């Protein structure tokens, strides 16, 4: 099945097109002059909308990529000799090409295990008790990084984040959240955005939009206003202070208006659940992690893999190919027909 002349996409939400409402907002922002470098009304309006959504005072800075959001946010949270504690599957470990180390000028990523892509408060506590804090021979504990939704497609519950937040506070560490799929996690949890961010101890959030219908826009949100002071300079130095900021902000403004961001993510989540339910019914197939966002990790029979390999479906083989695992990602524009087509091919 070819949709609009393209292959059927289950490879990545990055591969999906721009949501029409957001594309229209970019076009609307293209009329006449507007102050540059973020001094435009759209950019100021985005920050005000985020204050309402998160029910608190905050600072919000648009950037164009998730990598920029993550690494620039982390750069104000750690010295060059600091340690950033993250899950071994974290995006900042696997998919940022050394950018965290580069932008923090050398901070060390300390990788931890944890079921379903989640850090465990007890393991963090045990590590931090013997971290060598204050010892000149060791990197100094600085930041805990968590991903919401995780790289396994699961979502941290509010209480799980709050427990990690307490560990961070006890050891005087910052808590950073990579929220590239924040909207998908929020739709699954059904809680207030504040409950899984600042109320749970999160200092800085990388708020994603690109994976959820935007052309290319993220926001670095500071709930800890003290840490926001130097970010403007870090962003400029890191080449992410856009002169025509209105085009990033127009995307975010449309994204946040009338709950579009939640509508898009909610649809992607529903398509993921339908996909997982269909795969679970296929003999010999196995869902590997709870499906709590828009990602499905599955182990498939060899015949299913052979059929996928010659189909018109875009997808990823996950890990060692001999394990027979795939990663499937649904998007804001995944249709029921797409899901049915995928399941027919696998079956």
Image (cartoon, rainbow, N blue to C red):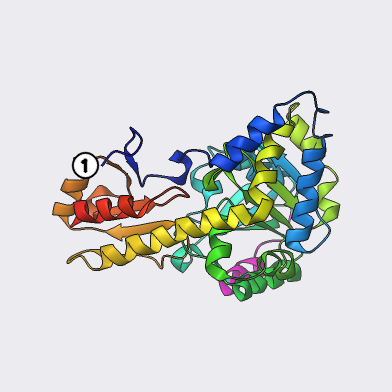
Q: Is residue 134 visible?
A: no
Question: Which residue in the structure is indicated by mark 1?
Answer: 311
Compared to residue 269, the image places residue 248 above or below, namely above
Kindly identify the residue that appears in the image at 31 percent across and 52 percent down: 337
Q: Would you say residue 125 sits in the magenta stretch?
A: yes
Q: Would you say residue 74 sits in the magenta stretch?
A: no
Helix, strand or loop for disc 1: loop
> Farthest residue in the top direction?
32
Kindly identify the residue that appears in the image at 76 percent across and 53 percent down: 49
In the rendered image, residue 151, in percent from the top left (x then y), is placed at: 47, 56
In the rendered image, residue 157, in percent from the top left (x then y), is placed at: 57, 72
Q: Is residue 10 visible?
A: yes
| Residue 38: quarter of image | top right
Compared to residue 63, the image places residue 130 above or below, namely below
In the rendered image, residue 247, in percent from the top left (x then y), is placed at: 69, 32
Give, as a single range, the part of the protein colored magenta.
121-135
| Residue 275: quarter of image | bottom left
Q: Is residue 16 left or right of residue 166?
A: left
Kindly identify the residue that appears in the image at 80 percent across and 30 percent down: 37
* Viewer-proximal residue among 25 and 38: 25
* Viewer-proximal residue among 62 and 87: 62
Kindly identify the residue that appears in the image at 41 percent across and 65 percent down: 291
- Quarter of the N terminus within the rendering: top left
Q: Is residue 130 left or right of residue 93?
A: right
In the rendered image, residue 112, in percent from the top left (x then y), is placed at: 52, 61
Compared to residue 100, the image places residue 146 above or below, namely below
- Quarter of the C terminus within the rendering: bottom left
- How many numbered marks have been drawn onto this rendered protein structure? 1
């Amino acid at each position: 099945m070819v949709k609009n002349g393209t292959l059927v996409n289950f490879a990545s939400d990055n591969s999906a097109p721009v949501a029409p409402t957001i594309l229209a907002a970019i076009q609307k922002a293209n009329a006449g002059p507007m102050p540059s470098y973020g001094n435009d009304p759209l950019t100021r309006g985005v920050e005000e909308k985020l204050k309402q959504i998160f029910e608190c005072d905050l600072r919000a800075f648009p950037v164009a990529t998730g990598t920029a959001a993550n690494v620039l946010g982390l750069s104000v949270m750690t010295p060059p000799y600091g340690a950033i504690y993250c899950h071994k599957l974290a995006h900042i470990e696997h998919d940022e090409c050394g950018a965290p180390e580069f932008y923090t000028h050398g901070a060390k990523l300390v990788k931890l295990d944890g079921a379903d892509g989640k850090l465990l408060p007890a393991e963090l506590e045990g590590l931090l008790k013997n971290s060598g804090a204050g010892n000149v021979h060791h990197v100094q504990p600085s930041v805990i990084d968590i991903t919401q939704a995780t790289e396994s497609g699961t979502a941290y519950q509010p209480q799980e984040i709050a427990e990690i937040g307490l560990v961070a506070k006890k050891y005087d560490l910052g808590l950073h959240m990579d929220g590239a799929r924040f909207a998908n996690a929020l739709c699954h949890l059904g809680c207030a955005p504040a409950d899984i961010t600042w109320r749970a101890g999160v200092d800085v959030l990388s708020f994603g939009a690109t994976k959820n219908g935007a052309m290319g826009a993220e926001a670095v949100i500071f709930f800890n206003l003290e840490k926001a002071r130097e970010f403007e300079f870090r962003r400029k130095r890191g080449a992410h202070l856009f002169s025509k900021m209105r085009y990033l902000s127009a995307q975010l403004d449309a994204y946040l208006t009338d709950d579009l961001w939640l509508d898009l993510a909610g649809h992607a989540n529903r398509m993921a659940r339908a996909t997982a339910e269909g795969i679970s019914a296929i003999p010999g197939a196995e869902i590997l992690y709870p499906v709590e966002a828009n990602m499905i990790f599955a182990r498939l029979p060899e015949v299913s893999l052979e059929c996928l390999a010659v189909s018109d479906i875009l997808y990823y083989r996950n890990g060692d190919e001999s394990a027979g695992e795939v990663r499937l990602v649904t998007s804001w524009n995944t249709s029921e027909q797409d899901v049915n087509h995928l399941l027919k091919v696998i079956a």
